[in-house]
Image (cartoon, rainbow, N blue to C red):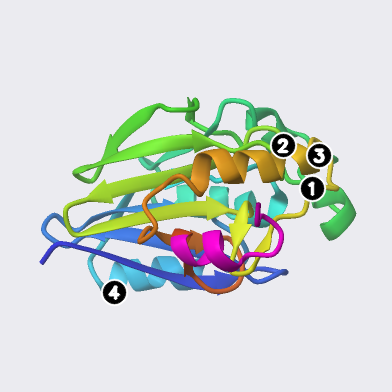
């Protein structure tokens, strides 16, 4: 027993939605929610896993548009987002739902988190690392455990790439600087679970990612 990470790629632009489960208690946290999230929720039901928190990495539509679907299945779940990205949740222009979907998406969070804050969920201490650049207040969630180090980083750092910075509230210089100063300084064996594409490690990106090489 212990902890396990699993997820599905869902929604209109293939967004990774994750779950991290405490196998001893059956409780889990979710990371981002988009598209037909019911597929992932059905798996949780089948596995008798109960999500108690939904951590949003940032406020773009493809990470938030199924928040209310999750709430409809789990009314007691708490939804978290970075304090500086909270405004995107209710702004269809800045969360890109109008331009990409043709209709506005607006949701609300239960809690906001700040840079450096530690939140304790499912028996884990989760460090919130604000990394502005893709959006003004995107949050990466870092977990250091005796058996693993993992980072859920949304659209900040990818396998061989970095997030876009040409959307509203984006900043290309801030994105690169913050990745270098806040993420590449994490232990090299940290497994990175990004919002799109495949997982990677901090060490791999530090050595070979052409967008952030010093």
**Is mark 2 in CB contact (under 8 Å) with mark 1?**
yes
Whichever of callouts 3 and 2 sits on the residue coming sooner in the sequence is: 3
Q: Is residue 6 left or right of residue 206?
A: left
**Is mark 1 in CB contact (under 8 Å) with mark 3?**
no
Residue 165 is tagged as 1
Q: Which residue is mark 3?
A: 94
Q: Quadrant of the N terminus?
A: bottom left
72 w.r.t. 170: above or below: below
User: Across the whole image, how many numbered discs are drawn on residues?
Assistant: 4
- Can you give x and y, in whole percent of width and height, for residue 13 in the image? 71, 69
**In terms of secondary structure, where does tag 4 sit?**
helix
**Mark-to-mark CA distance, 2 and 1:** 9 Å
Q: Would you call the spot at circle 1 few (<14 residues within 10 Å), some (14-19), or many (20 or more)?
A: many
**In terms of secondary structure, where does tag 3 sit?**
loop
Which residue is at a point 47% across and 47% down the rendered structure image? 71
Q: Which residue is mark 2?
A: 174
**In terms of secondary structure, where does tag 1 sit?**
loop
- Can you give x and y, in whole percent of width and height, for residue 180 in the image? 59, 45
**Mark-to-mark CA distance, 1 and 3:** 13 Å
**In terms of secondary structure, where does tag 2 sit?**
helix
- Can you give x and y, in whole percent of width and height, for residue 34 in the image? 60, 60
Q: Nearer the viewer, mark 3 or mark 2?
A: 2
Q: Would you call the spot at circle 4 few (<14 residues within 10 Å), some (14-19), or many (20 or more)?
A: few
């Amino acid at each position: 027993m212990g902890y396990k990470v699993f997820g599905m790629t869902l929604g209109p632009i293939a967004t990774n939605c994750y779950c991290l489960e405490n196998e001893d208690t059956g409780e889990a946290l979710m990371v981002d929610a988009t598209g037909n999230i019911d597929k992932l929720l059905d798996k949780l039901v089948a596995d008798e896993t109960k999500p108690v928190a939904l951590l949003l990495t940032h406020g773009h539509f493809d990470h938030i548009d199924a928040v209310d679907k999750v709430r409809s299945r789990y009314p007691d779940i708490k939804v978290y987002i970075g304090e500086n990205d909270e405004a995107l949740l209710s702004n269809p222009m800045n969360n890109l739902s109008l331009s990409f979907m043709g209709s506005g998406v607006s949701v609300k969070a239960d809690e906001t988190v700040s840079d450096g804050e530690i939140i304790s969920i499912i028996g884990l201490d989760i460090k919130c690392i604000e990394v502005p650049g893709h959006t003004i207040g995107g949050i990466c969630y870092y977990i250091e455990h005796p058996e693993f180090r993992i980072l859920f980083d949304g659209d900040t750092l990818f396998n061989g790439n970095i997030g876009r910075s040409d959307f509203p509230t984006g900043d290309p210089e801030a994105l690169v600087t913050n990745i270098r100063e806040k993420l590449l300084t994490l232990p090299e064996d940290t497994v990175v679970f990004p919002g799109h594409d495949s997982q990677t490690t901090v060490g791999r990106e530090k050595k070979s990612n052409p967008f952030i090489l010093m």
